[in-house]
Image (cartoon, grey):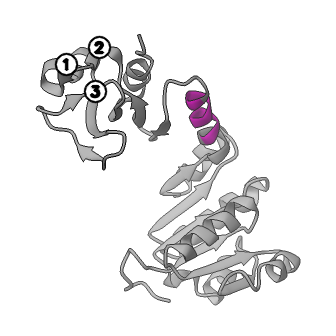
Amino acid sequence: MGKNDSPLTAPVLVVGLGRFGSSVSRSLERLGHEVLAVDERPDIVQKYASDFTHVVAADTTDTEALRQIGADQFDRAVVGIGTDIEASVLTVLSLVELGVEEVWAKAINAKHARILERVGATHVVRPESAMGERVAHMVTGAMIDYIEFDDGFSIARTRAPRVAFDQTLAEAALRSKYGITVVGVKRRGEDFTYARPETLVNASDELIVSGPTRKVEAFCALRA
């Protein structure tokens, strides 16, 4: 494992093997990344010893302990420690001090997220909050799928609204009327296609749209 690997296969350090950390580790390995999974509890390490290629026990709040397991050789790390906020913050701080370029950290609330950002986490995720927002949108029927980014920008998959039926995207002028951009169109039985001005919208189409979160939400709510 080293820092010169291709980003598509680069090794990743994952700290904290709770539900979040273990899930991230499995997904990374499935995508072809080598993972060094770390937890402070020996029983957790033993539990996952046969699941991941490299699993070690270490106190990740200790910079020297992280150095000893080779954490300074990684470009990217994921800190999945949730309930122990002090350990989460100290681990992120230690990784930053070791020169890890990208540190993804799980936060359990907004205050925790702000602290992680201040000590140097490059990406902060709140999985429970993000999933709750996503499910709420899908339950209402307004969206089929939804992703919101930190800067108030969203991408959503939604059913085409009646206002766009049997018109090209140029004729429907959805961008000027609703402030969103149609990125692509998925037609039943056909492959996804990137949106073009001449793309005709049918009643059964699904649209991939992007834009400011509130405008995307308002557009996806247009059903009648």
Q: Nearer the viewer, mark 2 or mark 3?
A: 3
Q: Residue furthest front?
A: 189
Q: Looking at the picture, which amino acid does disc 3 mark?
A: Asn
At x 65% / y 77%, what residue is drawn?
63
Numbered badge on residue 2: none
Instruction: Give the residues in magenta.
Output: 131-138
CA–CA distance between discs 1 and 2?
Answer: 7 Å
Give the mark, 1 or 2, whose residue is nearer the N terminus: 2
Seen in the picture, residue 201 relative to 99 is either above or below; the reply is above
Numbered badge on residue 202: 3
Seen in the picture, residue 44 relative to 165 is either above or below; the reply is below
Q: Main secondary structure of the magenta part?
A: helix
Examine the structure image and report whether residue 133 is included in the region drawn in magenta: yes
Give the mark, 1 or 3, whose residue is nearer the N terminus: 1
**In front of the other: 186 or 135:** 186
Image quarter in which the C terminus is found: top left
Q: Is residue 83 left or right of residue 150?
A: right
Q: Locate residue 202, reporting x and y percent.
A: 28, 27
Residue denoted by label 1: 172
Numbered badge on residue 163: 2
Q: Is residue 36 left or right of residue 101?
A: right
Q: Are marks 1 and 2 in contact (CB under 8 Å)?
A: yes
At x 44% / y 41%, what residue is drawn?
149
Q: Are marks 1 and 3 in contact (CB under 8 Å)?
A: no
Q: Are marks 2 and 3 in contact (CB under 8 Å)?
A: no
Seen in the picture, residue 210 relative to 128 is either above or below; the reply is above
**In front of the other: 72 or 34:** 34
